[in-house]
Amino acid sequence: MFDTSLVKQKMDVHPRPTIWSINALEKEGLAKVSKLPITIKILLENMLRNYDGKVVTEEDVMAVANWSPSGSDKELPYKPARVIMQDFTGVPLVADLAAMRDAVKRLGSDPGRVNPIVPSELVIDHSVQVDYFGTGYALDMNMEKEMERNRERYMFLKWAQSAFNNMRIVPPGRGIIHQVNMEYLARVVFVSDTGSGPIAYPDTVIGTDSHTTMISGIGVLGWGVGGIEAEAVMLGQPHYIQVPQVVGVKLTGELQEGVTATDLALTITELLRKRGVVGKIVEFYGPGLKYLPTWDRATVANMAPEYGATTGYFPVDEDTMKYLALTGRDEASLKLVEQYLKVQGMFHTGDEEPNYSEVIEVNLDKVEPSIAGPRNPEERIPLKKAKQAMTELILSFSKEKKEVPVEINGTTSTLTHGSLIIAAITSCTNTSNPTVMLGAGLVAKKAVERGLRARPYVKTSLAPGSTVVTEYLKNSGLLPYLEALNFHVTGYGCTVCIGNTGPIPEPVAKAVRDGNLYATAVLSGNRNFEGRIHPLARGAFLASPMLVVVYALAGRMDIDLYNEPIGIDPNGRPVYMRDIWPTMAEIKEAIQNALVPELFKEKYSDVFRGNQLWEQLKAPSGELYAWDPSSTYIRKPPFFDDVSLEPSKVSSIKGARVLLLLGDRITTDHISPANAIPIDSPAGKYLLANGVKPEDFNTYGSRRGNHEVMMRGGFSNVRLRNLLVDREGGWTVYLPTGEVMSVYDAAMKYKEQGIPLIILAGKQYGTGSSRDWAAKATYLLGVKAVIAESFERIHRSNLVDMGVLPLQFKDGQGWKSLGLTGKEVFDILGIEDISPHKELTVRATGPDGKVIEFNVIARLDTEVEVEYYRHGGILPFVMRKIISSS
């Protein structure tokens, strides 16, 4: 047994907590830890502190202490300090917990044992939509509409808050999950009282939103997982990870005048996506770090899912400490954080040169203004080449020039290919950053002073990441200028970035449809996947809040912002972007005058208290939830209906048909959309049949507590390309008859016949959000296995968690190279004795009797994942564990 007394020490700082010293290992000659990356040091502390000889073994401790830059397949029972959720992913998670309580009671055990063990926080931020914009009443009206639409969901969450221990809920209207996490919830160093005295340890977090990585910008190790994994961690199950590789990104130089953190984030996203960092931790260091404010670091860390990393970590340094003080952390906490991290060798001084798996150097001097699009965050376009890129996109869509007149509020304009219909300052990525937010306010001020206005056909919106942002925009005197350009506050939530864009004014929508125009959107968010922002926006582009304002003034994306005027002032003089772009000195002065700790202290003093509408909600009570069978929002999930005390044996998959034949980079948005529910979709028809009016459909994201809606929404994205059919959208072929029908209808016909289903796909399957319903819908549609050339980290894990087998073609192979058409009948053999990375044989028999046989790799990456798969998924596994331990 490992002697933990070797590493336990007392800190000489209030409240004199016990710590597990990783440096003691080096002093005892057990390992050399001083040159380890800081993220590995955090994982090492986690193993030491949780060591018990059973779940966490000496082998686990030493695997991290003797970390190799190549990483390893060794799985670690990692125990994060806390779990954070947003409402889109949190509601189905809470529904699963409630259903698990029912199942535990059915099987004769105590349902009260189903209870979060790990501190858990849920921020309601993904449900507000931009129904109203461009007016002073937009915020209030949107929040009223939000409460009206989501009343039932919010009552369910209020029940959960009282029914479960260790769960805190931030009501709607307080901010976006990641900004609230960064400005208030994050501890940086956790202090807990175990009953035998206080202990201190690094704040670590997993979240049900993929952009949980943003918290790594302030030195808190965090990343996104599926809601299913988060649920298991909440219930005390370790989060199993392999010993990771850590890529060091060495920052040198300094951002030049006119270059923003958004430009840096898009540059790093493009670079690291090309270099390939999927499944790896990225750790930033180097002399350039001191020139990068903490909020700029958070902007880059937020984009980690876009560059494919597990997380993008920035260590705590002097600037981080200034940020923590600015955001209202008390003096005692600040002292503890600094001393703890320095004692553990986790505080960045600028002199460190850790051993990394690989080092990539980024010269900040070379970063240039950029946008990204039209459909992926890594598709960076230098701003100086934006017009050329847009022209090529438009020509690839249509070579016919179009001009469609549109009248808005008495003003007639002309829409063409490239016209901008959405300009949104939205999402946590940038709205947490005062440099670009106050910068946007200064752009607006200079534009208004030159007599410019946003084009009338552009739907504008401003969704700050927290109420603090609104206050410092007011304090700086800049909010009225944004409002003069129709950028009124529309909500405190993800809004446009998640697809909660709301309706486009009908005259504009009609003009786009009638002219079949290549209409565009620009947003300051982190995601622009196909069909996500709005169905009418063929191209969506990521940009800084400052550029969002500029493009709204120009009214089109096919413009050379360096050489063409963005507008004409009342005297007929052209106004160029350079005329209204603020200097960094002006921005820094605005920050210094507008941001003070009192703002943060005031706005977060009652963060768990909602507005009057929230406080008036009467939640049900009781240990078990009273499910309403007529509800179209909250239904009892079926994942425990047939679960017994013992799992069934796994077996080979035989006689399977292909439900979807897919290409590269299928995102979780393609698999499970989060935005509006079309009236003619299977989900829309279901809602109509249950008496829901089309104007009350809400979004897929808001109805994640209803599996009937979500399984019908599976693979229904309007831009999905299933190569079994010659049309976009959620369509497939029912192969036994050759009929073209919706994916849902076909899946149900297959289920009636007892025919198992598989999916064939290309590279990077499951890119995008940590959306558990992408895996849940796949499971409920009857898919037993997905065979792809490669998987994105979170979605692969989620498939395993739902008992769906992820299989990977061998290197150099894919369904195309093997000559598969998707019309074959498939047998997948060798599953009975499945093991990590086992090669399985796939036999595909074509309609003509021709057999194609090939091997695939089972992407069950650890023994624990094999165990989950044998149990039919992680939820039955955890439930059986709870019962067996009672």
Image (spheres, rainbow, N blue to C red):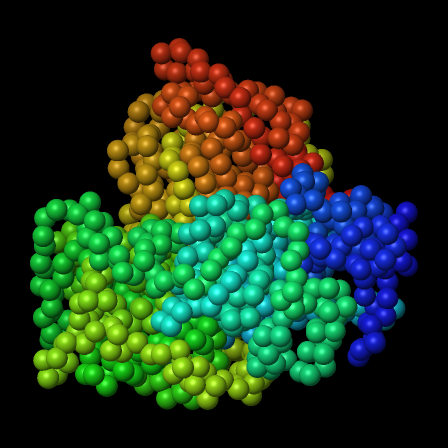
How far across and down, in percent of the image, does residue 509 sit?
Answer: 19, 60
* Residue drawn 27% across the image and 54% down it: 539
* Residue drawn 66% across the image and 29% down it: 835
Residue 44 falls left or right of residue 665:
right
How far across and down, in percent of the image, does residue 64 sit?
Answer: 74, 49
Residue 34 falls left or right of residue 640:
right
The answer to whether residue 641 is above or below residue 140 is above
Residue 12 falls left or right of residue 298:
right
* Residue drawn 63% across the image and 37% down it: 861
Q: Quadrant of residue 11?
A: bottom right
Pick whichever, 112 or 200, lies toward us.
Answer: 200
User: Residue 619: in sight, yes or no?
Assistant: no
The answer to whether residue 646 is above or below residue 635 is above
User: Residue 587: in sight, yes or no?
Assistant: yes
Q: Quadrant of residue 508?
A: bottom left
Pick whichever, 54 or 182, lies toward us.
Answer: 182
How far across and down, in percent of the image, does residue 350 sit?
Answer: 62, 67
The count of marks equals 0
Q: Quadrant of residue 736?
A: top left
* Residue drawn 59% across the image and 79% down it: 322
How far across and down, in percent of the image, does residue 426 sit?
Answer: 39, 68
Residue 458 falls left or right of residue 45:
left
The answer to whether residue 154 is above or below residue 707 is below
